[in-house]
Amino acid sequence: MPTPEQITATVHRYLELVAKGAPDEVVELYASDATLEDPVGGEVHIGRQAIRGFYANIENVKGTTEIHTLRALGHEAAFYWQLSLDFGNGVGMSIEIISVMTFDADAKITSMKAYWGPDNVTNH
């Protein structure tokens, strides 16, 4: 089982890479058979190729992330965070998200669910 410190490091690396718009690096944090559901109730992406396709939406987009709270226990983490994206020309958006991740023994993400909806999005 991964330690809380390993899980915390993976979560922080995940947020850093999402902010950089680096889908190839983000997908390396996932186990090969991982699942991603973002937002919950939407399509479930299974495996690294599908997950890479999901993160292609943020490729090369300027972003910032801010973590408000993180709990890492057992082989899971839950965290409340904000993603702000800058699409250029003064257009952008911020999303407040609660994410829940599970991890394997190597602290690779085995599943990720993101809880957010239209009420959590601010356009600017």
Image: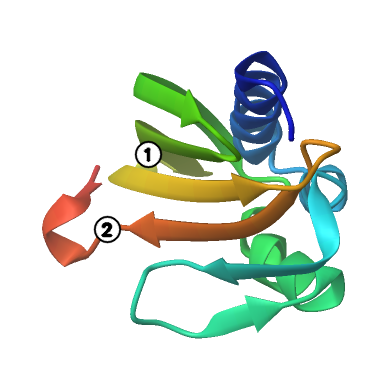
Residue 56 drawn above or below residue 105: below
What percent of the width, then of the height, locates residue 48?
Answer: 83, 68
The amino acid type of the residue labelled 2 equals Trp
Q: Badge 2 local density, few (<14 within 10 Å), some, or many (20+)?
A: some
The amino acid type of the residue labelled 1 equals Gly
What percent of the width, then of the height, locates residue 67?
Answer: 40, 22
Q: Where is residue 70, by image quadrant?
A: top left
Q: Which of marks 2 and 1 is in front?
A: 2
What percent of the width, then of the height, locates residue 30?
Answer: 78, 53
Residue 13 drawn above or below residue 30: above
Residue 63 drawn above or below residue 58: above
Residue that appears at 60% across and 40% down: 75
Quadrant position of the N terminus in the picture:
top right
Residue that appears at 61% across and 30% down: 11
**SS category of the residue bearing label 2:** loop
Determine the CA span between mark 2 and mark 1: 24 Å
What percent of the width, then of the height, locates residue 12?
Answer: 62, 23
Report whether residue 90 is seen: yes
Report whether residue 94 is seen: no
Residue that appears at 46% across and 41% down: 85
Residue, disc 2 = 116
**SS category of the residue bearing label 1:** loop
| Dot placed on the residue nearer the N-terminal end, 2 or 1 | 1
Which disc, if any, is residue 70?
none
How is the rendered protein coloured? rainbow
Quadrant position of the C terminus in the picture:
top left
Check the image and name the residue furthest to the top.
Answer: 5
Check the image and name the residue furthest to the left.
Answer: 119
Residue, disc 1 = 90
